[in-house]
Image (spheres, grey):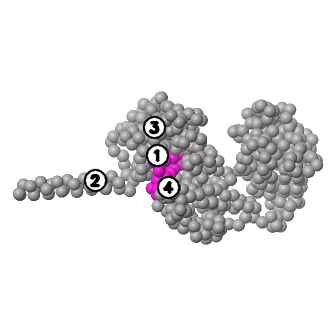
Amino acid sequence: MKTNRFFTIVLGLIATIAITSCVQDDDYTVPESLGDEENIGLNNLIANSTAITVSEAKSYFVPGEVTAITTNVYVKGYVSSSDRTGNFYKEFFIQDSPSNPTAAIKVVLNQVDSYNQFNFGREVYINLNGLVIGEVRGGDDVIAIGGTGNSDGEVEQITGNRVPSKIFRSQVTETMEPLVVTFSQVNDSHIGMYVMVENAQFPDSLEGEFYVDPFDDFDTSRTIQSCDGFGYSSFPLETSSFADFAQLPLPTSGGGTIAGVITKTFNGSNLVMALNTTDDVKFDQAKCEPLDIDEFDIIFEEDFVGGLNGWDVITTEGTREWYATSFGGVSYIRGSAYNGSSGEPMISWLISPSFDFDAQEDEQMILEIADAFSDAGEEPLKAYFSNDYVAGADPTTATWTEIGQTEIEALPINGGFFDNEYDVTGLIDLSEASGNGFIAFVYDSNGGAISSTRDLSNVKILAPQ
């Protein structure tokens, strides 16, 4: 009996130790150092493989296919998402730099609570040899690193057993600095990046609502808005019903900054922002108010009704040029390098009549532009001002200062042909212009690489009252 009692006590102690060990494995603290095995694995990877950038890793992607990586290459990145609050599941994103990132990519793995290992800001190295790159779900445009591909051309998760030999941490955890953007600037290139929007707020119509609708099974989309010139730009915030903050009320009484990761809806139909934590919602200021057009004087306006109305068109490359036309009752000036099958070399200048910039102060310009058609290239439309240009002369001999790049590139891409969906830019600063000068809009097809069509329907120059 004494012997049996002794073994019972020993077995009890062993069970207690085992239970304690499990609890320690699930400890929510982030390890400060790495084990010898992980250090050795990382060192071997760096010594025997070639580093590629996140952008280079994404270049393996072929739409509709899964690309198997069979060479000794690895990609380094910094974890930009976190599943600590339950808003991400069996995935994390890495971006190529902890600040001012230029590219990001998703990693899908059969592992929950990955933040314990691949925490926010952690520097990670991924051995791509033997892994695949493609879309997690066909057509969602989110490029991901996975373990295998399936018969539908989709990426499957890296199994839990393969994670230790494919994804390595360094001892570095960087402070992640969100990339500051506006909602109107966000596009597919931001997917996976940790970004921040200023002057953001939830609309008053959401007062009393929660991050997730209690009747939704999976995700809820809530509108965030930000003051943008004379109106608001908006963007969806998507939250999983499994997030631990799902039933917290939305902070609708104030505004400020919001930071999160750009991703896509489950079916890939829309870009959305997803929070790592509600600590990134800092709505502790008064809500912003859009500018009031009544507080400005319109000192110049051109709607191109009747044609060019004294504006000059001078083409310095190719034979295609700006031309006046109308559609659906709207008059506009069109620039396009598209010849019916491809783009042609084209640099065409649309130059305003002379304007006295000293007659008022702090001028601002707003433009109404329609994207009648876009290819996948860069923006062909640029704006400039000059005060040494001579009317009718070769514009390339004058000094021009570019203006409005951010505002023009922030306009949404409407797509389609002849849609006449005009968008208004934010305020373009002209306050540095002086004397008698000119404004020019230049369509540059980059030697024919760009074939997008741009329609300019209205130019307004404003001055504060």
Residue for badge 1: 123
Seen at 56% across and 33% down, the residue is 65
- Badge 4 density bin: few <14, some 14–19, many ≥20, Cα 10 Å: many
Question: Which of 226/153 is in front?
Answer: 153
The answer to whether residue 416 is seen in the rendering is yes
* Precedes in sequence: disc 2 or disc 3: 2
The answer to whether residue 275 is seen in the rendering is no
Q: CA distance from mark 4 to mark 3?
A: 22 Å
Q: Which type of secondary structure does the marked residue at label 2 adopt?
A: helix
* Precedes in sequence: disc 1 or disc 3: 1
Q: CA distance from mark 4 to mark 1?
A: 21 Å
Q: Which residues are magenta?
A: 80-100
* Precedes in sequence: disc 2 or disc 4: 2
Question: Which of 305/239 is in front?
Answer: 239
Is residue 138 left or right of 346 when viewed as pictured?
left
- Badge 3 density bin: few <14, some 14–19, many ≥20, Cα 10 Å: many
- Badge 1 density bin: few <14, some 14–19, many ≥20, Cα 10 Å: many
Residue for badge 2: 21
Which mark is in front, 2 or 4? 4
Give the x, y percent position of residue 349.
Answer: 85, 41
Seen at 59% across and 46% down, the residue is 268
* Precedes in sequence: disc 4 or disc 3: 4
Say which quarter of the image contains residue 318. Answer: top right
Residue for badge 4: 87
Callout 4, which amino acid? Asn
